[in-house]
Amino acid sequence: MGGIGATGIIFLVLIALLLFGPNKLPELGRAFGKTLREFKSGARDIMDDNDRRDSDKNRTEVNRSEHNEKENKRLPD
């Protein structure tokens, strides 16, 4: 089961031309491109937030282990 071939794309373009007309298609294309850009930007922001949280979590664990080592050390009597 392959993807959409060249004939499928041509068929979709013809249907879009019949439904919306040649004057409306550039506007629809711009709106679709803008929507994809916004979606991509939002997805990138979410992924960056997750990466920051993971790095903050690792940093916190390292700081805790260093803190525990300091607490376990005793001064000589």
Image (cartoon, grey):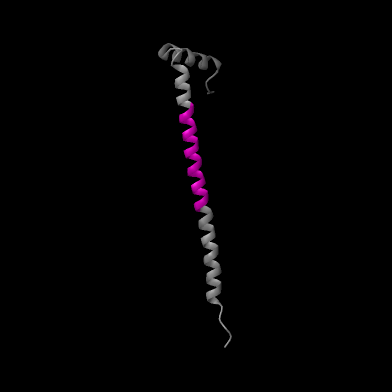
Q: Residue at x 43, y 11 (%)?
A: 18
**Which residue does the image show at 48% across and 30% down from the upper left?**
36
**Magenta span:** 33-53
User: Residue 16 is drawn in which quadrant?
Assistant: top left
Q: Position of residue 21 (x, y in %)?
A: 43, 12
Q: Quadrant of residue 72?
A: bottom right
Camera-side residue of 9 and 43: 43
Establish if 48 lies above or below 18. below
Secondary structure character of the magenta stretch overall: helix
Q: Is residue 3 magenta?
A: no
Which residue: 54% across, 58% down? 58
Where does the C terminus fall, quadrant-wise? bottom right
Location of residue 57 with respect to 19 vertically, above or below: below
Between 40 and 72, which is closer to the camera in this rendering? 40
Q: Residue furthest left?
A: 19
Seen as rendered, the residue at the extreme bottom is 77
Number of disc labels: 0
Note whether 77 is above or below 8 in the view shown. Answer: below
Q: Position of residue 62 (x, y in %)?
A: 55, 63
Relative depth, front residue between 23 and 58: 23
| Residue located at (47% from left, 35% from top) | 39
Q: Position of residue 41 (x, y in %)?
A: 49, 37
